[in-house]
Amino acid sequence: MKIICDTHVHSDNSFDGNSSVFEICEAALDKGINTVIITDHMEAPEIRLGDRSVYGNAVKSITKSVADVEEVSEKFKGKVKLLKGMELGEPMHMPKMTGKALAIADFDFILASIHNLKDKEDFYYLDYNNENVDDLLSKYFEELLDTALNADFDSLAHLTYPLRYIYERTDIRPDLDNYSEIIDEIFLALIKRDKALEINTSGLFKEIKSTLPDINMVRRFKELGGKYVTIGSDAHNQKDLAKGVEQGIELAKTCGFNYYTVFEKRTPKYIEIWY
C-alpha cells in the first residue's frame, strides 16, 4: 500500500512560513498525503529574547502552532493524520531555553537542527567568499555531533544544511570525504541512541540537486546500522507540501531501508516502502 508521509512542514506560525495549518491539510487531502507533521521553527536560544527576537516570539509561535494542529486535526479526522512537531534549532546552545521549548506541549515529534554556529548568523546569511568554509563545516559537524550525543530529539534534520547555500552562491564544492570520520561519529551516536536521520528533499530543487544528506551518506548510515530515517520536504507553503518525498522514499529503499519512519507521541512507527 502506498503511504506518503511528510515529516518536516512549516506553517505560517514559522517566521518564514506562508500557509496556514488548515491550508496545508487541504493540500494534503488533494495530493493524497496520509500524514503531515507540522514542525514549525523553534530557535531555542531566541526564547530569551521574547518579543524582541527578529524571528518573533518563539514560545507564542509554537504554542499557536500546537493549538492550530489540535484544532485542524479534528476537522480532517479520518482523512489526513496531522501530528504535533517542532523543528528545534540549536538545542545545545542554551540548554535551559531548550528545556522550556520542549515543555511547551506534548509533542509527537522533535526534529533537531543547527541553522547557525554560536555567535554566528544563520548559514543562510553568510558570505562564503569571505568565510573559511572548511573551518565553518568543521565546527558545524562538531555541533551536530554534540547534538546527536546529548540533545532530546527524534530525528536529525538536513545534515548538510550549509551546502544548500554554499552551492547556490559560490563555486566552492567542499569534499565531504574530509569530514567522513566525524560524520560516522554522528551516525553512530544516532544509532546508539535510537535516533533517526532525516532525508530532507528540499535540496533536490536547489542548486545542490541532492537530498540533504545525499544518497552516499544515507547508504553509509544504513551500513553502520541505522534503523530509522524520516523523510521531509521542508515545505514552507502548501504548494511545496511533500515535494520530493516520493523520491526520498525511493532513495531510502535504494540504500537498503525497507521502511521509513514517522514518530507519534515520540515513538517510531515503521511505514513500509512499497517500491
Image (cartoon, rainbow, N blue to C red):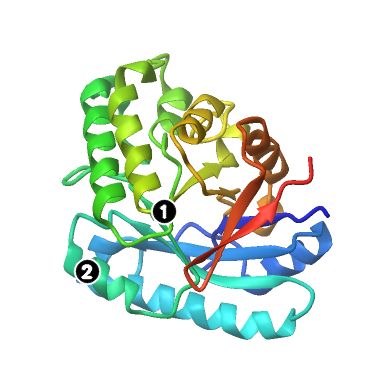
**Residue 80's spot in the image, x, y percent?**
74, 71
**Depth check, front residue: 213 or 127:** 213
Compared to residue 86, the image places residue 184 above or below, namely above
Report x, y in % for residue 167. 46, 23
**Side of 91 relative to 70 (left or right):** left
Crowd rating for badge 2 (residues with CA inside 10 Å; few <14, some 14–19, many 20+): some
Tell me how far mark 2 sits from mark 1, CA to CA: 24 Å
Dot in front, 2 or 1: 1
256 or 129, which is in the foreground? 256
Q: Earlier in the sequence, mark 2 or mark 1?
A: 2
Residue at numbered disc 2: 97
Seen from the viewer's position, the closer of residues 130 and 197 is 197
| SS of the residue under disc 1 | loop
Q: Depth check: give the residue in front, 3 or 269.
A: 269
Q: Answer left or right for 241 relative to 13.
A: right
Q: Which mark is residue 217?
A: none
**Are there few (<14), some (14-19), or many (20+) residues within 10 Å of tag 1?**
some
Q: Horizontal and vertical percent for residue 87?
A: 43, 59
